[in-house]
Image: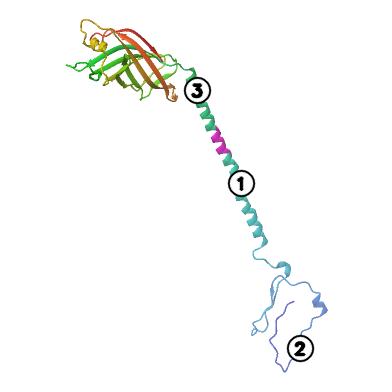
Amino acid sequence: MEGRVPPAPDSDDTDDNSLPLHSSAESKSPPPSPLLITPPPDMHSETYVIQIPKDQIYRIPPPENALFVERHGKKPVEKNKKSRPNCWVWITGSILVVLALVIALILVTLSIVYRSKSPSFSVAHVLVKHAQNSTHKHSQSAGYTISLKANNPNEIMGIDYDSGGVVTLSSEGKKIATGKFPSLEQGDNGFKKIKVFLKGTKETLPKEIEKSMKANKTKVPVSLTLNAKLRVKLKLGVIKTWIIDMDVACKFKVNTLGVGSMILSEECQN
């Protein structure tokens, strides 16, 4: 339907015959074009009638936009869902690898501990130093240097002697000197000479110890006991075990505590 709205007629000229009529031929005519604007012949009129077919009315926004947003909005969610399992798989795999390495390290360490042999010791030499003009009644005035011979029977494993080892020297049940076991490393399958420095205690020296220290020409043999509490670690390459406590007890006899001291007999157990 197209046309223009005529201006309102004067009241005097208005009658029933003034209404526009349409013929039957016009009602059966084909639908108008999608957008047709009929300019009014009378330029003084400012009112237009625009007809648009219903099947060509555009929606705002068009339905294609909704489909586009729906399709592209789901993809990030799907990617996130796929990436999460991959992330968890990577984390789980890393944890399993670390656990496997830890278990392997523990097994190797246990194998080192159970297959290893403890080091053995022997007393090699004893040297006593005492202050000049001393009466030797108290062991505090004397210093002792005891040389030990350590044997590592393990072919492929070394030994680390950790700090904190304590050594005591006794005679007739009295502690006459104490000291620290030195911190050092020993290679595999070999001997190592270790010197232990001991300082005298405040205990009164036994008479035999005093005689042996004073003796010059006539040597007085004495028996002594050395006790050591050691802290050792076994190692295989870069792998080391935990600290293993070891007790060593050596009983030995020297010909004299003066000049020319020699070991007459010795026996160490651990």
Image quadrant containing the N terminus: bottom right
Image point (80%, 76%), residue name:
27
127 sits left or right of 23 in the view: left
Image quadrant containing the C terminus: top left
What's the CA distance linking mark 1 and mark 3? 44 Å
Please tell me whether mark 1 or mark 3 is closer to you in this view.
3
**Picture disc at residue 18:** 2
- Residue 138 found in image quarter: top left
Image: magenta residue range: 89-96
What main secondary structure does the magenta stretch of the protein show? helix
Disc 1 target residue? 81
**Disc 1 element:** helix
What's the CA distance linking mark 3 and mark 2? 117 Å
Looking at this view, name the residue that lies furthest to the bottom. Answer: 12
Please tell me whether mark 1 or mark 2 is closer to you in this view.
1
Above or below, 32 relative to 102: below
Identify residue type, mark 1: Lys
Label pair 3/2, CB-CB below 8 angstroms: no
Identify residue type, mark 2: Ser
Above or below, 217 relative to 18: above
Residue 89 is situated, as x and y percent measured from the top left of the image, at 58, 38
Residue 182 is situated, as x and y percent measured from the top left of the image, at 33, 21
Residue 223 is situated, as x and y percent measured from the top left of the image, at 31, 10
Label 2 neighbourhood size at 10 Å, few (<14), some (14-19), many (20+)? few
Residue closer to the observer: 53 or 134: 134
Residue closer to the observer: 131 or 174: 174
152 sits left or right of 259 in the view: right
Label pair 1/2, CB-CB below 8 angstroms: no
